[in-house]
Amino acid sequence: MFYALMCKDKPGSLDLRMATRPPHVEYLKGLEANGVLKMAGPLLGEDEKPIGSLLVVAAADKAEAEAVAAGDPYELAGLFETTEIRAFNWVFGKPEA
């Protein structure tokens, strides 16, 4: 099953995001190599600067998706104000389709 992880940054945390980006990218590369990460990218504000993250992951259940979210260096650094995890039915644009 797929899960969408919608993570919203704490206000005024762009510096923390940029400082934590290298380990975050390495974490995502590892998830991708293991077939867990299906897509990811920053959510942008009106000024086109990052204000959060959107990831789609393959996981057996919500608990596994929660573990992926909990291991993200952005989460560990305290960047996110909120993280919402929802089951996702990937219908269009799915690479495996």
Image: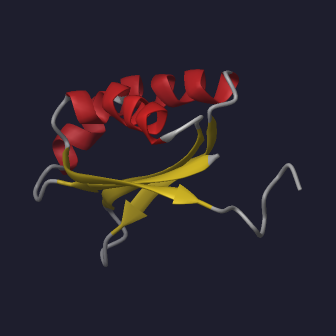
Q: Is residue 21 above or below residue 45?
A: above
Q: Which quadrant of the structure image shows residue 32?
A: top right
Residue at the extreme bottom: 46
Residue at the extreme left: 12
Q: Is residue 21 above or below residue 26?
A: below
As drawn, is 65 to the left or to the right of 56? left
Observer-nearest of 94 and 42: 94
Residue at the extreme right: 97
Q: Is residue 83 above or below residue 27?
A: below
Q: Residue at x 77, y 70 (%)?
A: 92
As drawn, is 67 to the left or to the right of 3? left
Way the structure is coloured? secondary structure
Q: Position of residue 10 (x, y in %)?
A: 14, 54
Q: Which quadrant of the structure image shows residue 47?
A: bottom left
Observer-nearest of 36 and 1: 1
Count of labels in the image: 0
Q: Residue at x 19, y 30 (%)?
A: 77
Q: Is residue 13 above or below residue 16?
A: below
As drawn, is 3 to the left or to the right of 17? right
Looking at the figure, which quarter contains the C terminus?
A: bottom right
Q: Position of residue 65 (x, y in %)?
A: 46, 38
Q: Residue at x 40, y 62 (%)?
A: 43
Q: Position of residue 64 (x, y in %)?
A: 47, 31
